[in-house]
Structures are given as C-alpha cells and as structure tokens.
Image: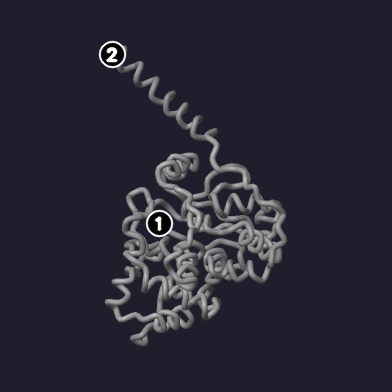
C-alpha cells in the first residue's frame, strides 16, 4: 500500500519536473547574420517561391496580404498561419533580422520557443545570408495589418509546445544546401528550389505517426493532406511513367494545366496560382529538370 501511495504522489511530481525541464531547455543558435543590404524585389521573388503568400493570405476569408489566418487541419489539431505583416504588435514589425533568420532557418521564435513543423523551416535552412537579407527587405515593405494571429487548436498532448523540443531532438536535422559537382547548374538550381524554398517534400513525402517526414521515401507521395486529399509521387520514375516531360511539367507549373488537359486542384492549384506561376521560365525548367532526372 505504501509503495502505491509513493508512486501515486511521485508520478505527478516527476511529470511536472520533466515539463519544467522541457520548458527551460534552450533551443536554437544565435544567428550571426549582419545587417546585409537586401534586395526587396529579389526577396519578393523568393517569397513567391517559398509559398509565403499562399500560406499566409486568407483569400477565401477576405484577409489582407500576409495577415495570416489560413486554416490547416491535421490529425494533431488545426493550425492557423500567423500574421507576417509589419504590424509591431500582431506581426513581425518589432523583429530584428536576427529574429527573422532564426525563425526562418531554425524554427525558433524571438522568445526562444519552437514553432510547429507546419511551418516548413527545415527546408528554409537552405537560404543563404543574402537570401535572408533579401526576404527581410521584402517583408519590411508589407503594410501593417493590426489583426492578431489566431491561436492553434491542438489536441493534447500536442498543445504543449515545449514537447516540440523532444520532437526536434528526434527528427530535426538541419542541413544546408550543397550542390552536386557532377550535375549541371540547371539541375542544381532545381535541387535548391525543390529541396529548399519550394519545400515540395512537405506535401509529397509520407510522414510517420508523429508527423516527421520519412526521408527514405522522399517525394514518393503522401496520404491525408490537410485539404483531405493525397499527393502523388513526383519521383523521376513515377513522373516518367505518367508521361511527364520537362516541357510538360514546366508548362504545368506555369499554368496549372496538365498534359491530359485537366488542371491541378486543391493545394497544388494554389501552389501554381500564388507561387510557381510567378517564377522565371528558367527556374520552372530547373524544377522540371531536377525532378525528372534525380535518382530515387
């Protein structure tokens, strides 16, 4: 009986101690990025490439550009994209470029708390310091919108943000972009876009029960996307089997029209509408070249 009482009283105390440790567990590293002169036009281009407009503008709800509020339902709860305008209270107007770089490349807020991986920061680690400076210059031109970000509606225990630190320790492996000297400049540009800012693997790679991408199945397609659908495999073999060519894929990324005359729907339609349609012809060619020629 005594042992049972000891366990009964000790368990909550141990759980509380563990949570306290998680709460103070530091994450992230200081960003040694200087006040580089940024090019807002290039930054706006990178923002289109990265899906910022599609994910942070609630067009269906009449929201202002980059003011957030886009709903993303998942098995873990419902996420809402935050306000990224220059409003100092509800957006990022009070941030520094170092805060911006840490959020973008490390998934860590200015307060040192982890962001949920619904924000595809693992892909944005591919950004160079100059890329970050250009993006920062572009975001500083966005008019402020005084609308608070809507809180996520997460199911227990996923509503305990400190628990993300354990998730990060298990699954978050920061990787910077490295080119392949055996491949062409065009192929490597496609690799940078696909594996970096365009974060194609976020939707086209299956995930495990804790929401981590299964790296060995990169770009093999995924079930149960937030919009209720599923994504197809976009490996080289799968694309070629479906009859895709570089020209056909490049054209689809510009117009949303597939070789059979049908159009992309759901989230891929939004990707084209708000992202790839704005890319240069060369960058769309690079994406198509990489996807159709990569191994795996």
Question: Compared to 164, does 60 lie above or below?
Answer: below
Q: Residue at x 43, y 72 (%)?
A: 268
Image spot of residue 223 (x, y percent): 32, 62
Q: Give coordinates of residue 244: x percent, y percent.
A: 34, 80
Asked if residue 257 lies left or right of residue 87, the reply is left
Please name the residue shown 45% across and 73% down the image: 287
Q: How many marks?
A: 2
Q: CA distance from mark 2 to mark 1?
A: 43 Å
Which of the two discs, 2 and 1, sits closer to the camera?
Answer: 1
Q: Position of residue 75 (x, y in %)?
A: 37, 54
Of helix, strand and loop, which one carries label 2?
loop
Q: Residues within 10 Å of mark 1 (few under 14, many from 20)?
A: some
Residue occupying image coordinates x 44% and y 23%: 13
Q: Which residue is mark 1?
A: 74
The residue at 62%/57% (across/down) is 129
Q: From the top left corner, tell me how far across and down residue 48 is, in percent.
A: 56, 70
**Badge 2 local density, few (<14 within 10 Å), some, or many (20+)?**
few
Front one among 19 and 278: 278
Secondary structure at badge 1 equals strand
Asked if residue 200 shows in the view, the reply is yes
> Against 245, is 21 above or below?
above
Q: Residue furthest top?
A: 2
Front-lying residue, 112 or 218: 218
Name the disc covering residue 1, or none.
2
Image quadrant holding the N terminus, namely top left
Quadrant of the image occupied by residue 167: top left
């Amino acid at each position: 009986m005594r042992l049972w009482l000891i366990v009964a009283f000790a368990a909550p105390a141990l759980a509380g101690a563990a949570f306290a440790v998680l709460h103070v567990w530091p994450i992230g590293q200081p960003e040694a990025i200087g006040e580089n002169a940024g090019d807002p036009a290039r930054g706006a281009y990178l923002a289109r490439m990265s899906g910022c407009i599609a994910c942070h503008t609630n067009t269906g709800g009449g929201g202002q550009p980059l003011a957030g509020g886009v709903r993303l339902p998942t098995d873990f709860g419902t996420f809402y994209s935050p306000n990224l305008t220059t409003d100092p209270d509800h957006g990022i107007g009070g941030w520094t470029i170092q805060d911006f770089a840490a959020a973008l490349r490390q998934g860590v807020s200015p307060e040192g708390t982890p962001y949920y991986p619904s924000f595809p920061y693992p892909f944005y680690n591919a950004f160079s310091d100059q890329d970050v400076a250009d993006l920062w210059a572009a975001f500083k031109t966005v008019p402020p919108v005084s609308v608070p970000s809507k809180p996520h509606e997460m199911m227990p225990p996923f509503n305990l943000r400190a628990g993300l630190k354990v998730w990060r320790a298990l699954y978050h492996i920061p990787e910077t972009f490295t080119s392949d000297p055996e491949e062409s400049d065009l192929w490597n540009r496609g690799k940078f876009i696909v594996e970096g800012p365009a974060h194609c693997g976020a939707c086209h790679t299956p995930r495990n029960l804790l929401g981590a991408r299964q790296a060995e199945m990169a770009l093999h397609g995924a079930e149960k996307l937030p919009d209720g659908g599923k994504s197809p495999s976009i490996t080289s073999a799968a694309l070629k089997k479906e009859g895709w060519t570089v020209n056909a894929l490049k054209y689809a990324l510009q117009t949303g029209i597939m070789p059979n005359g049908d159009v992309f729907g759901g989230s891929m339609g939004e990707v084209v509408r708000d992202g790839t349609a704005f890319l240069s012809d060369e960058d769309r060619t690079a994406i198509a070249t990489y996807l159709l020629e990569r191994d795996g």
